[in-house]
């Protein structure tokens, strides 16, 4: 049974999503369609990439992911399908694949334009047909023309020196926790068991320990922990860190280690 | 494998939708249930009809569509099931079927009232059972009593003369584009290759060409194009046409052709 | 075919839900996953319990319900799985099972902590694996250690005397109707066919009859009826009772019966 996932900025009050699902079910009736989310902010490729990169790896091999954000193609940004890490991704080659994947795809194919509806609702007329082609066991090269590489936006990474990590917030989650781009691995590597302070919003707020659980801090207290993605997260137990600390995507989070 | 779709104004934070799905899955375990949307504005039959009419045709033959908006029946507005264009539609006969379908249904059946829960949650007690009856291969006439016609609200159509089309906005989509009731076919028929102006909000804004793609206009520029429904759409490339141009459902869009 | 439902306060713009579904589909490909709702207010166990208790009973026997609200476990609030009324419920033993179930569970098992991700995203690392264990026909006692009872928060019940019921609003639904904790059974028992007044917000508003349908009252009129749950509901026909009458969860609704 094939699995197709859909991520979009359609916000679920439109006919776009329902039409896309209907077309897939008409051509491939046994498909399991999963909504990743449809509440990506309009045109926010970085947000879509963050959400999808943190969940696609748990899907079965062969899952097809439709990336329905910023899908207007132009001559230098064609629609493509890529095979990477045993999963298929269909989207517009506008840089999002660099944010989504850690490694180069195994195979990249540029999809044909839809001649009947040029520029219009590519998800319905191009992406759905590509997904159904894959489900019907077509080879990728039968669905378009092979390409060598994808355009790459590069995710923002922390800068480091001997005793500092300068990172930033990359995502605000449902509980208004602020997730940073500072991984546990990087933190451990620079820290070398030294004491430290995590500075939030210049030097006004600081935290000098890492929690294992939210409840290790009392209610209302600011805290830092490594979340299920092993990324440093700034939170307030039973509170709303993003609003109370005025954090948003790109806010600076700096860690200083002391000898 | 049967497909059932659900459109409602329940907004997904209620037990209504979950109960409806559970009852269908209890009686018809192999059903694929698809959410069209649950963010129709409360009681807005016209919006529900617009969304459903623009996607039901891509669904497999035999799909059953549950229209869960304005479902309180009264003696002159019974619950009905209709077969039209090889698909089933279950709803309240309050005029919505005139907005939804271009042609008269092949078959119409008035559903029995639920005697245990009169007036209450008809979707659960009447619609689900009707859908399961169809899935279990019952004939429509076994589910109620045949009727001759449906009540019809008539969709608002443009008025035309030799050199003018007076249309209106019928839908604001997720990207805040304004979709009108002016079809490509009507436009071509009146235009006869003449130059034209599209006037938006009296005569303050005008557009004198039709784009093929959004990106044919530069960022922030107002534009008009025929969308995937072949309806004239007013948009702003990378912008928010509805808010910036103060457009909402029923706003007038007028096209004048010049000899 | 197994059915798994998910209720959460994730609000659908996060990777949490998509990851949870992916993991279930990877391990149990034929599962039907149903979203109960993801718009529970953050950390609102009472709202989650109200929604789930009013729909789980229509699901097929053997359905597995994942309760993804307030799931941070602590030594006195472990993750548990319970079997009750032929359905499985997986959640954190923080009192919600008392609000959800009318009777003691048949079987209760405390789940093992996930040693790799202590305190983090238990839904993915603990709940999903428990659900898949059940789907793969494991016995509950193979999934953890048997427990004797669940923690119980007690739902707020009306107080009564010979000629009065003091109840309260327990839920505001999608249409802004106010649903109370006064059941039809209790009402009939105290009423004994006497006339009555329903008082809303001290004594300012009152209603002296029970509608069968919303449309028994004219548009804009305040009304009371027993809804599909057989609970007394305060509504305004074609209006918004919660806002117009300033009702919210815990607002008092009092009924006085007259000899």
Image (cartoon, coloured by chain):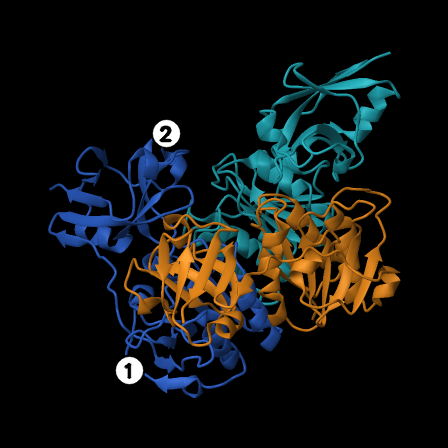
Chain colours: A orange, B cyan, C blue
Chain ID at mark 1: C
Q: Is residue C123 left or right of residue A79?
A: left
Q: Examine the rendering and report whether any part of residue A53 can be seen.
A: yes
| Image quadrant containing the N terminus of chain B | bottom right
Query: Which of marks 1 and 2 precedes in the sequence?
Result: 1
CA gap, disc 2 and disc 1: 51 Å
Few, some or many C-alpha atoms within 10 Å of disc 1 (few <14, some 14-19, many ≥20)? few
Chain ID at mark 2: C
The residue closer to the viewer here, A133 or C135, is A133
Q: Going 35% across and 80% down the picture, which residue do you hit?
A: C108
| Image quadrant containing the C terminus of chain B | top right
Image position, residue B128 (x, y; %)? 54, 55
Number of numbered discs visible in the structure rendering: 2
The residue closer to the viewer here, A229 or B98, is A229
Image position, residue B206 (x, y; %)? 71, 19
Q: Quadrant of residue A127?
A: bottom right
Q: Is residue A257 left or right of residue B247?
A: left
Query: Going by the picture, which residue comes out furthest to the top?
Result: B259
Q: Quadrant of residue B203?
A: top right
Question: What residue is shown with label 1?
Answer: C148
Q: Going 39% across and 40% down the picture, which residue do you hit?
A: C213
Residue C220 has which mark? 2
For the residues carrying marks 2 and 1, which lies nearer the camera in this image?
Answer: 1
Image position, residue A26 (x, y; %)? 74, 57
**Residue B134 vertical position relative to residue C252 in the rendered view, above or below:** below
The residue closer to the viewer here, C215 or A209, is A209
Q: Quadrant of residue A43?
A: top right
- The residue tagged with tag 1: helix, strand or loop? loop
**Residue C31 vertical position relative to residue B10 in the rendered view, above or below:** below
The residue closer to the viewer here, C143 or B139, is C143
- The residue tagged with tag 2: helix, strand or loop? loop
């Amino acid at each position: 049974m094939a699995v197709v996932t859909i991520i979009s900025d359609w916000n679920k009050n439109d006919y776009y999503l329902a039409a896309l699902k209907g077309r897939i079910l008409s051509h491939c009736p046994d498909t399991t369609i999963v909504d990743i989310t449809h509440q990506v902010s309009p045109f926010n490729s970085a947000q879509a990439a963050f959400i999808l990169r943190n969940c696609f790896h748990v899907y079965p091999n062969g899952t097809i992911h439709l990336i329905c954000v910023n899908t207007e193609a132009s001559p230098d940004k064609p629609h493509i399908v890529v095979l990477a890490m045993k999963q298929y991704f269909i989207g517009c080659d506008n840089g999002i694949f660099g944010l989504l994947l850690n490694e180069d795809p195994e195979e990249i194919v540029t999809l044909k334009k839809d001649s009947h509806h040029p520029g219009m609702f590519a998800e319905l007329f191009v992406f759905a047909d590509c997904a159904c082609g894959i489900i019907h066991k077509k080879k990728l090269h039968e669905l378009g023309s092979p390409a060598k590489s994808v355009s790459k936006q590069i995710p923002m990474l922390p800068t480091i020196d001997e005793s500092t990590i300068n990172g930033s917030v990359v995502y605000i989650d449902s509980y208004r926790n602020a997730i940073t781009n500072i991984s546990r691995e990087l933190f451990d590597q620079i820290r070398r068991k030294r004491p430290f302070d995590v500075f939030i919003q210049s030097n006004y707020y600081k935290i000098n320990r890492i929690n294992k659980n939210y409840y290790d801090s009392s209610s209302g207290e600011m805290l830092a922990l490594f979340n299920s993605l092993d990324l440093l997260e700034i939170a307030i137990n039973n509170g709303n860190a993003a609003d109370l600390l005025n954090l948003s995507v790109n806010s600076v989070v700096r860690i200083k280690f002391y000898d």
